[in-house]
Image: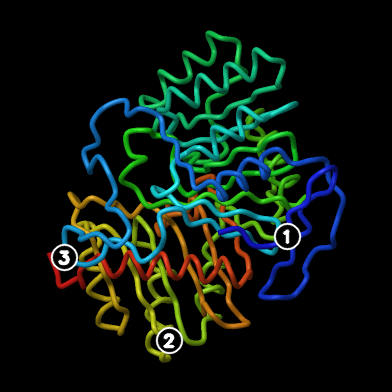
Amino acid sequence: MVRGDVRFGGFGFAAVRGGGATVRSHRRLRPCTLLVGLTLLAVSGCASAAPALSPSPRATAAPAAGSPSPTGGPASATPATVTATAGGGDTLVVEPDQGMGAVYQAITAARASIDLVMYELEDTTAVNDLIQAKDRGVSVRVILDQAYAKSQNGSAYATLAAHGVDVHWSSTQVDITHQKTLIVDSDAALVMTGNMTSQYYASTRDFILADTDARDVAAIEAVFDSDFSNTAVQASRGDDLIWSPGSAAALVALIQGAKKKLRVENEEMSDQEILGALEAAAQRGVDVQVCMTDSSSWSSEFSDLIHAGVKVYTYSSDAALYIHAKAIVADPGSDSVRWFLSSENFSSTSLDRNRELGVELGDASVGSRLASIIDGDIAGASPWSGS
């Protein structure tokens, strides 16, 4: 479903954010090919994914909406082609439901420039699209992590470099570059919770947000330029950005601001500040529900959360759906809704030392969508009881 005022022919996507409050002015932009492509994807409901490089150790396909999950509950309460538009400007894509067509379309539609930061790039379709963009005259720059995922990125790095793409290893100013963003033509940035690793596309819950806010895009570009040249940078928050290193305080504030409900998905759960904020929220009467893929690494943390009144739901590690998304929704359905999507896991490494990027917004329609998706995932999971 597409909501909002989408206008073409030289006009941008005038966005209203912050739970109904206008927090940036309407503005004229160049035609944004990225958002045009995303809107067409939403309307058509098409999905596209690259061929898997190798069989996924998790699963080969996510369960269809409403179908039985490995735990016996419905796998998802949301339609298979869920897209929402924040205030008419910023478009949300839900994975695995919609595939990676939005990313491929963004690359192939680029006219002047592409700047990609990716923790893991193992997607031959995307690599070929980047090379073809370079060959047609687009300025293509790529940053790939070298601190932890160098072996996974080696093939893509070598292929891109061999074809003349300006690809760099990640900056040594941070521990790990776990950020996942794609900027096209300086018009919009795709902020992703997931990696570009095709073997996991069909089985992994992730989100992609196309951010068209000019200050956000400029801030992401500025950090890209510094990381590309391996120089220090003081990252700007733009209008809506949350950067790591140093994101814990903003996430704790978001959790502390919840009055009635919190819906959370993440891949990791070890940061003590986040744990304390979730526990405190439950203890003050907020309905806090967390959905993750189960791991013995978080057993102690899950036990503490449950003891504090948090409801924890998990999928087994071999379930058809793997929870990789990093999302928080506070008070969905209310005028004070706030929501957050990011690359940031709830670990001290991710929040305090890595290069990570997230977006926090207050659009009610997208907040409700995110909460509905997480609720659907919870319905397909099992209450955690220890492992």
Secondary structure of residue under mark 2:
loop
Q: Residue 177: image x %, image y %? A: 50, 39
Crowd band around label 3 with a 10 angstrom C-alpha radius: few (<14), some (14–19), many (20+): few
- State the residue in front, 262 or 108: 108
Crowd band around label 1 with a 10 angstrom C-alpha radius: few (<14), some (14–19), many (20+): some
- Mark 2 / mark 3, whichever is N-terminal: 3
- Mark 1 / mark 2, whichever is N-terminal: 1
Q: Is residue 323 above or below residue 340?
A: above
Separation of residues labelled 2 and 3 (CA atoms): 28 Å
Instruction: Look at mark 3 in the image and give the residue it sits on.
Output: 72
Lateral position of residue 18 relative to residue 155, left or right: right
Q: Residue pushed farthest front?
A: 44
* Residue mark closest to the camera, 1 vs 3: 3
Three-letter code for the amino acid on which mark 3 is drawn: Gly
Q: Residue 315: image x %, image y %? A: 23, 60
Q: What's the residue at 33%, 58% (across, down)?
A: 65
Q: Residue 337: image x %, image y %? A: 58, 77
- State the residue in front, 146 or 220: 220
Instruction: Look at mark 1 in the image and give the residue it sits on.
Output: 239
Lateral position of residue 359 relative to residue 286, left or right: right
Q: Residue 183: image x %, image y %? A: 66, 38
- Circles 2 and 3 in contact, beta carbons < 8 Å: no
Crowd band around label 2 with a 10 angstrom C-alpha radius: few (<14), some (14–19), many (20+): many
- Mark 1 / mark 3, whichever is N-terminal: 3
Residue 286 numbered mark, or none: 2
Residue 264: tell me if it is visible: yes
